[in-house]
Image (cartoon, grey):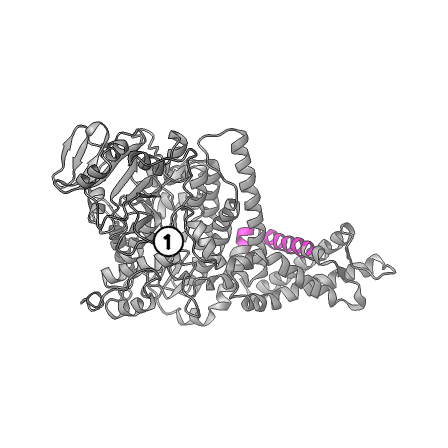
Amino acid sequence: MPRWKSLSGALFRVLAVWLVSSLTLLVLAALLPDFRLQSASGDSFTRTAFTAALGAGAFGLLSALVWPLLVRALLLVPALVIGLLVFFLNGSLLLLALGLIPEGRGQAAPETAVIVAAVMSATSSAASGFLAVRNDEAYHRRLVRLAGRRRGRRSVAARGPATPGTVFVQLDGLGHDLLCEAVRGDRPLMKTVARWTDGSHRLTPWRTDWSSQTGASQLALLHGSNEDLPAFRWYEKETRTLVVSNRPTSAAELQRRAIERTGDGGLLAYDGASRGNLFSGGADQVALVMSVAARRGRHNRSRAGYFAYFSDPANATRTAVSFVAEVVREIVQSLRTRFRRELPRVARGGLYPVIRAFATVVERDVVVAAVIGDMIAGRTAVYADLVGYDEVAHHSGPAHRDALQVLRSLDRAIALIATAARHAPRPYRIVLLSDHGQSHGPTFLDRYGLSLGDLVRAGCGLPVPRRAGRTPSGAEAREAARAALGRPEEADGQHPEKVEGPASSHPLVLASGNLGLVSFPDVPGRITREELDRRHPALLGTLANHPGIGFVLVRSAAHGPVVLGPSGAEHHLDTDHVTGTDPLAPFGAGAAEAVRRTDRFPHTADLMVNSACDPTTGAVHAFEEQIGSHGGLGGAQSHPFLLWPVELTPPTPDDGPLTGAEQVHRVLRRWLGEAEGPQLPLGPGADELRREVPPAEGFPSPGPAAQDKPR
């Protein structure tokens, strides 16, 4: 476009938005009693309109000049707080703008100023979007302009590489089969992804490990190993510590262990960026990354990405308004499911509407803006996680209309990223993938009237509470919101992070979706089947014969790992000898190998309990408060997807069927190498990153032998 056309178009948009803002001020002055644009004796309409134009212009200039400085000054304030304070900060700017109008014609009460500023920002943003035909297009242009200003020097330096960069976008919790449904038909739910599957990209499923959850999958995807990660949460007897993979200290420790195990920094160690993930992948540029959120001081850059986004008042207002709208939407949708008596359902009150809005709006917008900034800066590799669908599907169901609406918004986010790639100084290949799927079904508690903990206590002959307790959901967004708020970690409501006092002989029961873990803290190492039968002779039979339990893994002193099922069924994993009906048969091919691998982990629980699965419908029973769950075996949770550009070599058949996140990591590394750019650093790079990620509080440091291990 000729420069004069671009400048004239920009001038026209500024004047149009100024006009809309001025008219908005006039309307609000007529409607709100505590807001006026006239002198005490009254003014003519012309004079009042001129005053409104002055006020709108002053407010616009202050928003453009003062807002970025204000956000930078508040950068140390928890990021989510900045998002929630947008309205009040805008109100303060409006009061300042009214104070600049001569002769005191602009006055407003403080609470009225908040309303006026919010309405003005919303109308100006809508007007700007209307002039750009689509609001997403206007939003995209603002993000690209902002990224260009922030990273201009790097962009110039990055214009040299002709080799393409790679952007990995993880759609958290979206299974392969559901994605196929979302891209079918004449009016697909995900239009952008549907176009890709029809031409530019290829789609394939892959199978997760037994622990089908973000911690296990993403640690392997980014760092190449999820060894000794048996579940979402587990108990480590030697340190008497509860590890929860989505909490900052645990994520930092798991990342340190993976780096120690593999000997290299990670998938993003060369010129990479990690956005919205549990782990950094070795990236130097991080935002909303859980493994660095526990750091304090200038080295904690986890929330730095918020400034690049909220420094633009139009973006901040857009997100704040969308945040409020999402909270209202969740309340309305929750009431609708109750009025219609839809089953299954779980409680969706308390802070959940706010957590959902954080995941589906704030985190999505900040991550997308950060990815666009990375592409404008010309970074080599970017990995971003969009968690909104996973959060909603946990509480509404994987295929529920509430969750499908989130898929539509994620598709628009993908379209924004793809469009921004056209402005980047180098070509980009966009790879979509998921870390796991989700399986539907009523919770174990709702289906059978007692929790897994109650069932274990009954099998041990211990008293069972009359009122069954509910296990809180372990969804990723809750801890991400706490990290954004700068809140300290807390126990999950039932189990402390660190067990104090003498080790208890009572069982400790933990839940990871439809996978349960039972540990006996007073027994060093894993308890044997024989010892357990001496202590609690009814426990294994109680669990294995319960209709809601699919199978139980226990270690036998005589036979090694044994999978127990109903009616005395057994599968000896060392010899593959099966007695009765194979308890692993309903869970499909590969189940035995997945269980066998987990059994080798040092921190596998004394008993690993997987809920039953309907082989026809894929329904499971989560041991948490989730009607869309993942964490164990059964149903769609074990079948995520990989969608890659056709110019990349296919992951199969050379690699065989994709099984396990570690194998997918090798495919992703190979694709980075196909750009003919520098390879990922080993050795010294790993040492540097290991120093950057110290052992988390509450975890033992590696011994000298581990630190001196050759790489």
State the count of labels.
Answer: 1
Q: Secondary structure at mark 1?
A: loop
Residue 246 located left or right of residue 354: left
Q: Is residue 616 above or below residue 439?
A: above
The percent coordinates of residue 709 (x first, y second) are: 19, 66
> Residue flagged by tag 1: what amino acid is it?
Glu
Report the span colored magenta. 115-138
Kindly tell me whether residue 419 is visible in this rendering: no
**Rendered image quadrant of residue 313:** bottom right
User: Which is more toward the observer, 640 or 676?
Assistant: 640
Vertical position of residue 434 compared to residue 616: above or below: below
* Residue found at x 30% / y 61%: 256
> Is 256 displayed left or right of 127 in the figure?
left
Q: Depth check: give the residue in front, 217 or 668.
A: 217
In this rendering, is residue 391 above or below 164?
Answer: above
Predominant secondary structure, magenta span: helix
Vertical placement of residue 602 versus 471, above or below? below
Quarter of the picture containing the C terminus is bottom left
Task: Look at mark 1 in the image and give the residue it sits on.
Answer: 497
Q: In the image as oriented, which residue stretches furthest toward the right?
A: 41
Can you give x and y, in whole percent of width and height, for residue 558 in the image?
12, 40
- Please say whether residue 356 is one of the residues in the magenta stretch: no
Residue 2, how many percent across, how many down? 55, 64
In-front residue for pair 687/496: 496
Residue 127 counted in the magenta span: yes
* Relative to 294, 355 lies left or right: right
Most foreground residue, 161 or 694: 694
Image coords of residue 465 (percent x, y): 40, 35
In the visual, does 637 lie left or right of 35?
A: left
